[in-house]
Image (cartoon, rainbow, N blue to C red):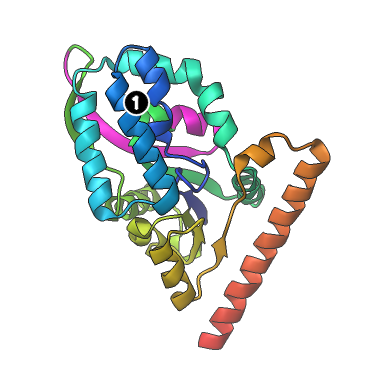
Amino acid sequence: MTAAAFFDLDKTILAKSSSLAFAKPLFQGGLIGRSAVLKSAYAQFVYLTSGADHDQMEQMRAYMQALCAGWPVEQVRQIVADTLDDVVDPIVYTEAMDLIAQHRAAGLDVIVISSSGTEIVEPICARLGVDRAIGTQMAVDDEGRYTGEILFYAYGEAKAEAMQALSAEFGYDLATSYAYTDSITDLPMLEAVGHPVAVNADDALRALAVEREWPTLDFARPEAMRAATRGERAKYAAGGAAAAVALGAAWYARRQRHR
């Protein structure tokens, strides 16, 4: 058995909600109207400033179910593929990419589990170079259109269940694995591994991380990273390596105290 590193996507690797980030391309593709774009922009603002609790996540699920019903799946995939660079590249945290690279260099598989749809999550994760990606799966009818039914919602306890299933399939040892997320709604994901880490944590998760002595990380705005020179990127990489060492030392010290 080997360890793995499990990452949430939104506000952990990306600075925004991956689903809401594609509102403009979906509008340009004729799949949503202006009112939906405005709603998505407002939802993005709320998400960035205060995160999303359980009720908001449930509202988002119902909203996306109603919005996506009838969309041609292939058109959605094409829109994502055509606009991936413009939409995603500017919102990737450099620190997250450094952390992913460190885990892969140490021989760990990197898995992303996100509540966004698989048609969005999978191409993003392919571009990021992670090993596996799991997203919300929606039912598709015989004509290749979304029915509006959700088959698997990658949220809350379902994320932990997916991690356990991957562990059984690929031989991951969750007790020595890592998990990174920003939201208290992902608590089951963090509790499923031996090394939970709160990243850009909302208030509830940050308080819990302090209480349980979990490591916390705060990533900078990606706009600053996007303009970084090669030398600055090296500085961030060195800082990420130092952070990883510090996390390991803190974790070891905590375990020694408990012993």
**Is residue 132 magenta-colored?**
yes
Is 171 or 181 nearer to us in this picture?
Answer: 181
Q: Quadrant of residue 36?
A: top left
Q: Is residue 78 visible?
A: yes
The residue singled out by tag 1 in the image is: 37
Start-end of magenta stretch: 122-142
The percent coordinates of residue 47 (x first, y second) are 39, 46
Q: Residue at x 36, y 19 (%)?
A: 26
Is 137 or 205 nearer to us in this picture?
Answer: 205
Q: Is residue 35 above or below residue 20?
A: above
Q: Is residue 177 visible?
A: no
In this rendering, would 63 be left or right of 75?
Answer: left
Q: Is residue 194 above or below residue 99?
A: below
The percent coordinates of residue 142 (x first, y second) are 16, 14
- Residue type (three-letter) at the residue carrying disc 1: Val
Dot 1 surroundings within 10 Å: few (below 14), some, or many (20 or more)?
some
**Is residue 139 magenta-colored?**
yes
The percent coordinates of residue 82 (x first, y second) are 48, 15
Q: Residue at x 22, y 35 (%)?
A: 63
Is 24 or 35 nearer to us in this picture?
Answer: 35
Determine the secondary structure under disc 1: helix
Q: Is residue 78 above or below residue 163?
A: above
Q: Residue at x 42, y 64 (%)?
A: 203
Q: Residue at x 69, y 64 (%)?
A: 245
The percent coordinates of residue 211 (x first, y second) are 44, 77
